[in-house]
Amino acid sequence: MVRTGARAATAATLASIFTSAGLFGQECEFDANSAASTASEAIQRLTEAPTAADSTTIFEEAWAALGSDLDSDNPVVPLLGAQIQIGLGNFPAAVEFLDRYDATAAPECMMHGQAQRYNAWVRLYNQGVTAYGASDYETALDAFVLANDFNPDLRTYSNAALLQSQLGDNAGAIETYQAALAADIPDADTESLRGIVRGLGEMLAAEGRADEALQTYRDYLAGNPDDVVIQIQYAGVLADEGQAEESAAIYAETLERADLTYQQWLEVGVGFYNAQNFPDAATAFANAREGNAYSKEAMENYVNASIQSGRPGPVIALADTLTQWYPYDALAHQLKFQALGRAEMNEQAMEAMGVEQELPLSVTFAQMAPAANGRYIVQLAFTNRTASGTLQMAFEFVDGGGQVVTEHTQAFGADSGSFTFEIQSDVPLAGFRYGTIGG
């Protein structure tokens, strides 16, 4: 589906270019060029190409037609050359053609080069995602890096940096994060920019470059003073560097905020937790639960931070609720065991451990994530222990008041290891729970 859509988009873009290129009297004008016209006529047949092999044949024909005049000063030649090379997957050559086009085209024609840069970026981004899904990390990294040569974008910068870090190249990851900020991308997505700043700051701090991490955070906060997530990151590095008074002031001011969403409180709590400030982390997660009492992540984090801060007693009941709502979740059972153990309820703790060890499967990941237009994506991963055959698991989805809004029963193989499904709801969903498996 993605590949077919890309072919159609290429043909449509080409038609648009020649319509506005002066062949029909529009503002952006190119001089006539017979080689380019022949190549363009070939490319128009892309909409009739049923397979990828057919598309390749058409692009090769177009390239052969254009080859007779590749050295032309007419900017339409490098523009078409770039489009053809993108279609053939020769992205470095396409970059050279687009650079040549940008150097020769009139200002009113720049949009066409930009359109082809975006076209290449989409293809490379999709290639990177596909390669990553196949655990081909080197290929994924190459795709994301090359994508930024066409169209600098924080998403591909971030993906490249994360892969570099995953592959052990922390220095390269830092350079990629820095390049993302230096690109100064206009209208950059707020969440993406925060992710770049956060990733760079964390990487610099981990590499012993705390001064640079602090400066990165300061530069960002100068233009985004209300970003509590980065403020907490900044305070954590300050604390590590012995600047406890300034760090404590940021923590105290943040905890006094009354305008944060539960998602922001979750982020703040994670920042506190990573700084090993467990009492304030527990407070932040408690605030998140006030905004959404049925968030699985908020419940888990509140219990965990409370245990780590030496206050296990008050969260034993919530830990038990987690094991009831998510009966196969390894983390839920671990938190219940830890809460009971830290509260010196050793006999009950051992009973809880025994229950977990007898489960037919162990869920290692369960999440509901919002998507567009009232859709929610549910993902679950598990390790099978003793189950067999085809299993069924019933899910309930609740609103902000805890009322069940919709239900879903998922069938899956005992040895499949994971499953994903989508839920549609006209009412915003606050959380979910699942029941015990059936055959």
Image: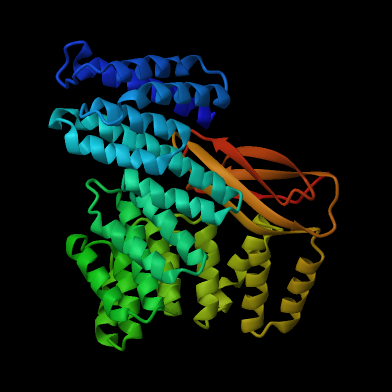
Q: Foreground: 204 or 7?
A: 7
- Name the foreground residue: 381 vs 10: 10
Looking at this view, name the residue that lies furthest to the top.
Answer: 24
User: According to the image, what is the colour scheme of the structure?
Assistant: rainbow
Seen in the image, is 79 located left or right of residue 127? left
Within the image, what quadrant is residue 237 found in? bottom left
Measuring from the top left, give residue 222's x and y in whole percent.
17, 65
Residue drawn at point x = 66 percent, y = 81 percent: 341
**In the image shown, does 61 or 410 lie closer to the viewer?**
61
Above or below: residue 140 compared with residue 87: below
Number of dots carrying numbers: 0
* Residue 26 position (above or below residue 177): above
- Residue furthest front in the image: 68
Residue 52: name its quadrant.
top right
Measured as percent of width and height from the top left, residue 37 is found at 31, 16
- Image quadrant containing the C terminus: top right
| Residue 53, quarter of picture | top right
- Kindly tell me whether residue 291 is visible in this rendering: no
305 horizontally vs 251: left or right: right
**Image coordinates for residue 46, horizontal then vertical, percent:** 46, 19
Is 334 placed left or right of 427 in the picture? right
Residue depicted at x 27% and y 80%: 211
Q: Is residue 254 left or right of residue 168?
A: left
Q: Residue at x 56, y 18 (%)?
A: 50
The residue positioned farthest toward the bottom in the image shown: 242
Task: Classify the position of the N terminus by image quarter.
Answer: top right
- Whether residue 312 can be seen here: yes
The vertical placement of 80 against 96, above or below, is above
Q: Is 364 in front, or is 83?
A: 83
Q: Residue at x 24, y 50 (%)?
A: 185
Provide residue 114's location: percent of width, then percent of height. 27, 35
